[in-house]
Image: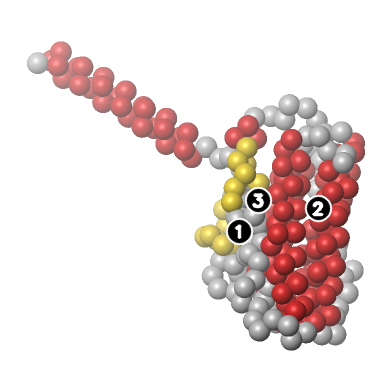
Amino acid sequence: MKRTRYIQSILAVVGLALVFGAVQAVAQPRFAAPRGNCYLYMPGANAAPAKPLTEAEKTALNDAIQDEYKARATYEKILDTFGDVRPFVNIINAEDRHVEALVWLHERYGVPVPEDTWADKVPAYASLKEAAEAAVAAETENGALFDELLKNVTNPEVRSVFEALQFATMEHHLPAFQRLVDYENGLNPSVDEFGRGSCYYGVPGAARRGAGMGAGYGRGRGAGFGAGVGRGAA
């Protein structure tokens, strides 16, 4: 009887260990770069980088985050001017997440994160139509910028993030702003079919703030990962 109970106890301990190990494996954070409305997982991102970035890659990383800073500040000013209009109120939340992904890469590879000083540098627009046209131009330029930056990047993690952000720009942000331009020109009866930006993603070691992606279309706290402040669904 004692031997039976001893064996049962051993099996119980082993079983608990296996369950705990499985939970830990599932809970292990993985870097997920956005690609449209899906995920691009890179489990190896928990390990130390295989090699440092080249100077050209560091420059590309800085150029990328500066352009995301600029877009975020521009859309923030548009929202302050015209209210929580779509698709700006949706896409600015995606811009927050794009910045977070690039900040994570900076920190992962020991590259100082540039300060965001764009708030006072972006223009104001006299009409929503003018703002929408400027957004179309900005997203088009952002897509072209990533084409140029990728020419100098061989690091697979950086390339994956750049390509994911470019995909979100060209396949979601740009069409959404173009629909708004068409609406303002009387060519589109609605702006309800807006682009939802890039997908939600996690960054290893980042603290969650809020829950999920925010509610409705308003700008409010409680969406996004890390230091990002959500501004509604994107």
Tell me, yes or no, if residue 47 can be seen here.
yes
Q: First in sequence: mark 3 or mark 2?
A: 3
Q: Give me the residue at 65% from left, 50% from top.
A: 34
Residue 224's disc is 1
- Residue at mark 2: 65
Residue that label 3 marks:
35
Q: Of the residues shown, which amino acid type is indicated by label 1?
A: Gly
User: Splitting the image into 4 quarters, where does residue 98 fall?
Assistant: bottom right
Please tell me whether mark 3 sits on a helix, a strand or a loop.
Answer: strand
Nearer to us: label 3 or label 1: 3
The N terminus, quarter of image: top left
Task: Decide if residue 124 is on the left or right side of residue 210.
Answer: right
Circle 1 residues within 10 Å: few <14, some 14–19, many ≥20: many
Query: Horizontal placement of 55 versus 211: left or right?
Result: right
Residue at 62% x, 73% y is 193
From the viewer's side, name the closer residue of 66 and 147.
147
Q: Residues within 10 Å of mark 2 (few under 14, many from 20)?
A: many
Which mark's residue is nearer the viewer, 3 or 2?
Answer: 3
When the figure is inspected, residue 18 is found, relative to residue 200, above or below; the finding is above
Alpha carbons under labels 3 and 2: distance apart: 17 Å
Q: Name which of mark 3 and mark 1 comes first in the sequence.
A: 3
Residue type at mark 2 is Ile
User: Going by the image, does 202 lie left or right of 112?
Assistant: left
